[in-house]
Image (tube, rainbow, N blue to C red):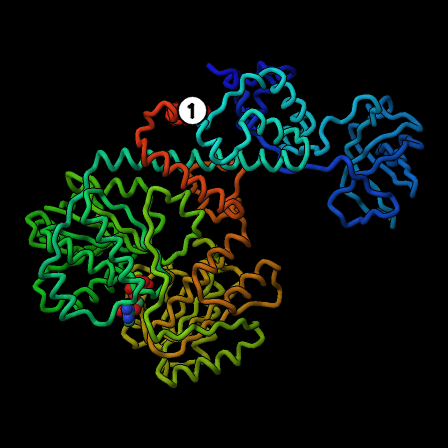
């Protein structure tokens, strides 16, 4: 056992009680965990603020001065400790309201001290409340010029485990184990990238000697972190591929060729051709495909899916498409029927509302192979649905379709079918590489020709009448309008109230029988909602008032205006998804973002980005910037299968790319990590597997 695995309770000055707190609050169980609890910032201990130049708005100040006076004041039975610190430029008060009795012995008049804290203003005077304070010790020089700050929790503070204490513990760990910290990356990699050694980088991340050392240490540790994640993903992927030989689609036959010659309704874009080739290459090879096809809303992913399905059929395989909603499944079904006209292909649909009798009929057709393409919702994944020979599965608009769900599909056949996940949610590259690192990627980065940019405007609530006038004009020209209300949680009463009030005012402005206004939201019965949507799809209603139920996939080319109410309450990617519901026909389309005047700076930024660009990938990158990767929304966060301790997906894209590349290179020549020079990596992966299990045991 490595010394780094020593239980943290055995570290000098820790013991059972403190160990419990470190376990619970920071998940620090052993020496290694502590060493990998990195500072979140550093304070430059060589720079001091002058008292007369202190800006009370600054986040923190550091002052060196002498104590000129201190005393305990009492009023209304409340005590406070006040000390005066002075430098050459002035005087400042230091105030403590509790836990101050130790100061009486600690402070000495006319002796030099360093204080650090956040300035406060009280009765026009700047002071420091509960600052950190330390004696200037002439002999014992501060051993690091950059003072690390460690994150601590309330519970830790209550038990006096401050950042300073954590720093002290770090020191103890180093004293105990520095010489025994072993390298965990192979020599050849360290040499190639000129990395700082592990031992040294851990030391300098906690006790940086200077900026250069800190930079090198940081790079090394970020690289290490991202490299191991990539190595693990790619290593497991290899094992999976080895175990599961994919179906070979060896020929292109009559289905594909007939479709291409007779039914292809338009010329493919270059991007569509490119991704089709990438997908075909997978399916023609001997590997099982796991590919993510990204393409902005309206970029034409469906036709790509259709073509690859036809090739599966040409090789006597069946295919299925899983859509996230019934509406979308129906749309796909209608489109497929139309596009496959005259080709003699049997395609059908299975959703939650499929009648039992028909369902049985479908099941038997799937089993004997007469049904070639099945389109449906998750109902397809019910265990009872058995295919004769399922060759490929298309998952539409569900980038969150995780490994576990994919595994469910594999069970549908003796060997896993090829899987193509399609999504319009642009996933920033760095995120994709970590969360979906086991998938290959194809990107449609080009829109079909003749698409007009959707014009996006931001309007305030008091401009509503003008917006109504605009709606009137568009309807007069035969167009249809979406109006979307935010719904943060389905149960939030007032959200529905907004929608209902909105509905009333719209019906007043657009009265029946001249106008038909439909509503669709999650609280309605499925059939009612469905009916409402269908009225809109068929062009019978001119206006559809909805919550985000319409977010995904619905295709109504005649709809040209998307009005988003309380737009400030939506995230960027959601706004972009909603906007993508219009601009699908040849007409000029518009997106109007309605808000009140009260907007946070972040909301303003989001709205500005929306009015400036239609490019989903740009928006995704901006989104990551605005929110930061530590602040991904719930779904993305839960998609992260690990915790990043030092790297940051927003800033460390380059290091991540490098780490992935190096992991790939190593696995290319040594896919089982059997070479002596890579032994260390295999060991790491094995240990990691074991750690994960025990860690879970400890948490649960
Ligand atoms: P998404 O990628 O959002 O799923 P779709 O596949 O639904 O997009 O395509 C959007 C629209 O663009 C459809 O009406 C489709 O017929 C049309 N389309 C797709 N590819 C092309 C193309 N190469 N040229 C012209 N129109 C196309
Ligand atoms: Mg689609």
Figure quadrant of the C terminus: top left
Residue 644, horizontal then vertical, whole percent: 50, 37
Residue position for label 1: 691
Residue 339, horizontal then vertical, whole percent: 17, 68
Residue 408 position (above or below residue 541): above
x 83%, y 47%: residue: 54
Regarding residue 534, the answer to whether it shows in the image is no
Residue 551 position (above or below residue 250): below
- Quarter occupied by residue 300: bottom left
Asked if the residue at label 1 sits under 8 Å from ligand 2, the reply is no
Residue 597 position (above or below residue 85): below
Residue 516 appears left or right of 221:
left
* Crowd around label 1: few <14 · some 14–19 · many ≥20 (10 Å): few
Element carrying mark 1: helix
Residue 671 position (above or below residue 429): above
x 39%, y 25%: residue: 677
Residue 533, horizontal then vertical, whole percent: 31, 67
- Quarter occupied by residue 695: top left
x 52%, y 48%: residue: 650
Front-most of residues 457 and 51: 51
- Quarter occupied by residue 179: top right
Quadrant for ligand 1 reads bottom left
Front-most of residues 87 and 161: 87
Residue 327 appears left or right of 503:
left
Front-most of residues 636 and 292: 292
Residue 577, horizontal then vertical, whole percent: 41, 62
Regarding residue 254, the answer to whether it shows in the image is yes
x 16%, y 48%: residue: 391
């Amino acid at each position: 056992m490595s010394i780094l695995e020593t239980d943290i309770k055995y570290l000098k000055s820790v013991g059972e009680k403190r160990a419990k707190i470190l376990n619970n609050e920071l998940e620090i169980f052993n020496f290694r965990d502590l060493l990998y609890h990195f500072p979140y910032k550093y304070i430059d201990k060589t720079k001091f603020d002058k008292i007369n130049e202190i800006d009370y708005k600054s986040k923190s100040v550091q002052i060196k001065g002498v104590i000129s006076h201190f005393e305990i004041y009492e009023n209304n039975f409340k005590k406070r400790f006040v000390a005066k610190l002075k430098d050459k430029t002035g005087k400042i008060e230091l105030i403590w309201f509790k836990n101050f009795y130790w100061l009486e012995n600690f402070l000495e008049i006319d002796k030099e001290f360093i204080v650090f804290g956040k300035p406060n203003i009280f009765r026009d005077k700047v002071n420091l409340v509960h600052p950190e304070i330390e004696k200037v010790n002439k002999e014992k020089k501060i051993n690091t010029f950059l003072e690390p700050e460690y994150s601590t929790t309330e519970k830790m503070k209550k038990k006096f485990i401050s950042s300073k204490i954590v720093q002290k513990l770090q020191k103890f760990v180093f004293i105990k184990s520095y010489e025994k910290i072993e390298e965990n990356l192979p020599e050849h990699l360290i040499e190639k990238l000129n990395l700082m050694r592990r031992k040294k980088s851990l030391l300098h991340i906690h006790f940086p000697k200077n900026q250069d050392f800190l930079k090198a240490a940081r790079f090394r540790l970020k690289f290490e972190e991202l490299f191991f994640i990539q190595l693990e993903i790619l290593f497991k992927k290899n094992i999976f591929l080895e175990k599961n030989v994919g179906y070979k689609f060896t020929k292109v036959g009559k289905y594909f060729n007939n479709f291409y010659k007779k039914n292809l309704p338009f010329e493919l874009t270059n991007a569509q051709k490119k991704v089709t080739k990438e997908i075909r290459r997978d399916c023609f090879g001997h590997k099982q495909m796991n590919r993510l096809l990204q393409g902005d809303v309206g970029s034409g992913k469906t036709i790509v899916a259709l073509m690859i399905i036809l090739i599966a059929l040409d090789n006597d395989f069946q295919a299925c498409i899983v859509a996230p909603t019934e509406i979308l499944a129906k749309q796909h079904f209608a489109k497929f029927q139309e596009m496959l006209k005259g080709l003699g292909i049997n395609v059908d649909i299975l959703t939650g509302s499929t009648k039992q009798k028909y369902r049985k009929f479908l099941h038997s057709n799937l089993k004997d192979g007469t049904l070639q393409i099945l389109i449906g919702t998750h109902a397809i994944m019910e265990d009872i649905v058995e295919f004769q020979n399922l060759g490929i599965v298309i998952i539409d608009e569900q980038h969150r379709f995780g490994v576990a769900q994919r595994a469910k599909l594999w069970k549908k056949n003796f060997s896993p079918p090829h899987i193509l996940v399609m999504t319009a949610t642009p996933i920033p590259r760095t995120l994709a590489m970590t969360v979906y690192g086991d998938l290959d990627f194809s990107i449609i980065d080009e829109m079909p020709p003749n698409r007009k940019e959707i014009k996006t405007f931001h309007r305030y609530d008091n401009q509503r009448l003008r917006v109504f006038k605009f709606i009137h004009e568009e309807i007069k020209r035969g167009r249809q309008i979406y109006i979307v209300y935010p719904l943060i949680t389905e149960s939030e009463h007032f959200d529905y109230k907004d929608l209902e009030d909105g509905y009333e005012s719209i019906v007043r402005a657009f009265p029946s029988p001249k106008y038909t206004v439909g509503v669709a939201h999650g609280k309605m019965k499925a059939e009612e909602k469905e009916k409402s949507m269908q009225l809109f799809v068929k062009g019978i209603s001119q206006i559809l008032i909805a919550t985000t139920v319409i977010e995904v996939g619905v295709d109504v080319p005649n709809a040209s205006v998307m009005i988003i109410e309380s737009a400030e309450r939506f995230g960027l990617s959601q706004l972009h998804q909603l906007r993508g519901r219009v601009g699908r026909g040849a007409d000029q389309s518009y997106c109007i973002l309605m808000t009140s005047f009260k907007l946070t700076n972040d909301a303003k930024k989001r709205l500005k980005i929306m009015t400036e660009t239609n490019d989903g990938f740009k928006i995704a990158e901006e989104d990551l910037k605005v929110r930061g990767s530590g602040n991904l929304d719930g779904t993305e966060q839960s998609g992260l299968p690990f915790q990043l301790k030092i790297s940051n997906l927003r800033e460390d894209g380059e290091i991540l790319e490098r780490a992935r590349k190096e992991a790939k290179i190593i696995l290319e020549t040594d896919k089982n990590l059997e070479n002596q020079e890579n032994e260390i990596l295999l060991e790491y992966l094995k240990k990691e597997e074991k750690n994960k299990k025990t860690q879970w045991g400890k948490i649960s």
